[in-house]
Amino acid sequence: MATKAFQKIYTKIIQINKATCSLNAIGVGNDELATVNGKLAQVVKIMGDEVTLQVFEGTEGIPTNAEVIFLGKAPSLKVSDQLAGRFFNSFGDPIDGGPEVEGEEREIGGPSVNPVRREQPSELIATGIAGIDLNNTLVSGQKIPFFADPDQPYNQVMANVALRAKTDKIILGGMGLTNDDYLYFKNVFNNAGVLDRIVSFVNTTENPPVERLLIPEMALTAAEYFAVDKNEKVLVLLTDMTSYADALAIVSNRMDQIPSKDSMPGSLYSDLAKIYEKAVQFPAGGSITIIAVTTLSGGDITHAIPDNTGYITEGQLFLRRDSDVGKVIVDPFRSLSRLKQLVIGIKTREDHPQVMNAAVRLFADAANAKTKLENGFDLTDYDERTLAFAKDYSTKLLAIDVNIDTTNMLDVTWGLLHKHFKPAEVNIKQELVDKYWK
Amino acid sequence: MSTKGKVKGIISNLVTVEVDGPVAQNEIAYIELGSQKLMAEVLKVIGDKAFVQVFESTRGLKVGNNVEFMGHMLEVTLGPGLLSRNYDGLQNDLDKLTGVFLQRGEYNYPLDTEKLWDFKPIAKAGDKVEAGLWLGEVDENHQPHKIMVPFKLEGTFTVKSIVPEGEHKILDVIAVLLDSEGKEIEVTMVQKWPVKKAITVHTEKPRPFKLLETGVRTIDTANPIVEGGTGFIPGPFGTGKTVLQHAISKQAEADIVIIAACGERANEVVEIFVEFPELEDPHTGRKLMERTIIIANTSNMPVASREASVYTAMTISEYYRAMGLRVLMMADSTSRWAQALREMSNRMEELPGQDAFPMDLSAIIATFYSRAGYVYLKNGQTGSITFIGTVSPAGGNLKEPVTEGTKKAARCFYALEQARADRKRYPAVNPIDSYSKYIEYPEFEEYISKRISPDWTSKVNDMKTILQRGKEVQEQINILGDDGVPVDYHVTFWKSEVIDFVILQQDAFDKVDSVTPIERQEYMLNMVMDICRTDFEFNNFVDVMDYFKRIINVCKQMNYSVFHSDDFEKYVGELNVILEERKI
Ligand SMILES: Nc1ncnc2c1ncn2[C@@H]1O[C@H](COP(=O)(O)OP(=O)(O)OP(=O)(O)O)[C@@H](O)[C@H]1O
Ligand SMILES: [Mg+2]
């Protein structure tokens, strides 16, 4: 970030702690950027003429006579079509060896869409994965995370979803990505020949953690450019939001704020909501859909990060290994797409809602039967049938390696219902049973 | 001369202002930032320093910026034309704002000053009146919108003159009042009121007792709420709080519905924007939007105005209650409001209470809920505000300050349960833990026995007993195994399942099943309780399950059919055939 001529240079820092440093300065705006010996920092507090700066890289090695230059603007990104196909760091600087992007400079973290100017999401996003399309159908303008333990293949599933979804742009926001995962995404996009549709903002585990706080808003500023200025359908991938929240905790902890649950800042809900609520369907046709990853520790979704996320997003996709069939499935119990009712049975076949619910209910009965079995009880014929059904259902539909269209998924489900049950056992409207039972 | 000041310090949206004159707690101020003015509210004063929370982003704000204090607290503007509008938490009309994005510092007048209303006087010259009494009325979306003596006027007044029936704009003077000293006061159709203060223009607040029909069976039948009652819906994320609230707001027998979307998803508000102008009020046949006001402060909108939004909604509710109307107010989610309080309290470095919430959280919640209620107005008429809030407990754990504080304040408790939601048993209201305190009121008992039938309460109690028994039996079966218990146990369990599937579960997305009028609820409960009272003949437990599954299936088909339609009667016939098979 180049400095302009005639900028005042301050050289007297009066206080330094782990994350911040303070100095006397006047005419400084809240949220403004500055450099401290070349390291990027942002104004987080002003008291009279004392200004406190949060240094993104951390304050290691900063001397009391460091040169501080205020940049007169909040963090921003230059937007134009030149963003496409490029890789950037947290500050929006290219990391792919390519030239600087030319374009209009926009502050990141801009204002919210007026709710009355939003359009109701109504366009189905097909992924081919039945655990998603059948049970948890996604819609453009939706925001939804994968909840997964760190050992689940969430980045692979997310990349598959991104490539199969029919969108104009894919924007990757990588936070605390391992270098391997970064290269994985780069390769997959490259091999699919879609690199020109992709913009990436990447903070890897090798970069300072606090820097990644800028990633989501960088990605979303780029997304808003394509969705608003160009009326494009944009899919934003944010992985891993748990690393983002951990960085928030680091900062608030260093600034001595009172932590709330799980050492997270009390503002976690608002901080996450500000990001996720950027998902929107615009009336002019453009949209921003956010698919994120929230890694769990030991499957615990009551931890503050997944918990707050669940309260914000429009559902969640829960990945788990089904040991009965040896595959990773999209768990139908803990997963949910709250926007699905806007499309299922409307954009898909009429029987979709009822068939979907019936199958999940029977899958739940299977879970009960399994508990009985584990407790050493005899199983009834019905129990046996639910268990057989559950195996088929997991393999043919819930597994993440399934790739078929939605009508096909419905037919497969009816087939399984027919194979294992009687019509009276499935609790589906009679007219649908009459029509589709086969 | 209004007090002025200059910005001295900024931490996020907490700004310290050095002032040159008097300021009041909760006074509104505007901070200049370039050509914009940012609205703020005084939270604390120490010496000549006022600490204000800014209702917007403070990005770019500098020390030295000018501040002007307005001499009043945060107020709402009350008058004809509130209905059908979409406001933000500070009562800006969202439809009047320009552009796709919300611009910082853009505020507007919440009502239409040009529209002509057909005013009909109620009071006449010479009448003695006081605050809240009705001077006249206009027709607002088929509701008699009363023009009242301004709530701020204290004492008794004499009507000097009132305009005759005719068309007027809201800011026209429609009456002139004389105070005890003969001073003239001009009254228009508009008045302002500070949101944090309750409007108390009633004479009495008796215990509420009239059933508020919601069309949701697990509420009306099992744990009814009443006109002027309070209730809350806690539940982990995704268990159905919003769907349940939306269902109630669509179906409830209320004159006015006020929805405060407080720190939740924008798309959920859009759903209301899209549906309510199309859907009909099942009681009047008019469009739902006609009776609805939406206060939208979604989670991405400024946190500070989130707190204001619930108060804005409550004050507007009180305004309509003073007209003798039945108001239903919903807030989703009150936890977000509590979190906004927490963020501010932490920034002000107040001593934190449990989970870092403010110490007085429980009192704040109680005061807010107490603004609801059924009232006798000064003219003998009645009005009510029924308030239902959702609570989003952290980690789904009900032992947290917002849930506990609300439990003390609200009389109905609709506990949404993860396990039920996981099994798609919607609405996921736990029938055993949930309660309505109103059932215990003799006034309610008397009312309901006239409204439905004298034995209604005892039937509902029987139903609950069976549910309880069913749960106990199920636990025993889980421990002892299917054949470790007598066949009777299975029958008891399956009877409770019939109640669960047919009465409690209800598909909010099915056109027919979503709304069940009270007559139909009575019919279904009678039918289900008849089944539960019947003795059946079984030899083994497998038959029990198969048999009751068939019963449930037919009853569910009834729920999906129009009441007493040919289809419906056909299923009644089928049910009777099935019952005959094993009846003893
Ligand atoms: N009565 C119902 N009938 C059918 N489906 C329902 C019902 N209630 C809830 N659901 C399902 O559950 C989903 C989540 O419901 P809802 O959005 O109301 O949850 P919530 O408790 O408000 O969650 P949050 O706290 O995250 O806002 C809905 O999208 C819908 O799929
Ligand atoms: Mg909700």
Image (spheres, coloured by chain):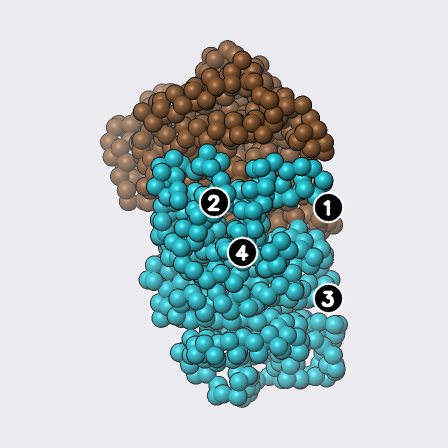
Chain colours: A cyan, B brown
- Pair 4/3: label in front: 4
Dot 3 amino acid type: Arg
Q: Residue at x 56, y 43 (%)?
A: A386
| Residue B105 position in % (x across, y down) | 46, 59
Along the horizontal axis of the image, is B299 left or right of B121? Answer: right
**Residue B38 picture location, percent across and down:** 50, 58
x 59%, y 41%: residue: A384
Pointer 4 residue Cβ closer than 8 Å to ligand 1: no
Q: Earlier in the sequence, mark 4 or mark 3?
A: 3
Q: Which numbered disc flags the more N-terminal residue, 2 or 3? A: 3
| Mark 2 residue element | helix
Farthest residue to the left: give it. B166
Query: CA–CA distance between discs 4 and 3?
Result: 48 Å
Residues flagged by tags 1 and 2 on a common chain: no
The subunit letter for the residue under badge 1 reads B
Q: Residues within 10 Å of mark 4 (few under 14, many from 20)?
A: some
Labelled pair 2, 3 in contact (Cβ < 8 Å): no
Q: What is the C-alpha distance between the residues marked 4 and 2? A: 15 Å
Q: Amino acid at mark 2?
A: Lys
Q: Which image quadrant for residue A3?
A: bottom right
What kind of element bears circle 3? helix
Mark identifier at residue A395: 4
Question: Dot 2 corresponds to which residue?
Answer: A419
Q: Amino acid at mark 4?
A: Thr
Disc 3: CA contacts within 10 A as few (<14), some (14-19) or many (>=20): some
Identify the residue under disc 1: B354
Residue at 56 percent across and 37 percent down: it is: A382
Q: Chain ID for label 3?
A: A
Would you say residue B418 is visible in this rendering? no
* Gap between marks 1 and 4 measured at Cα: 47 Å
Kindly state the secondary structure of the residue where label 4 is placed. Answer: helix
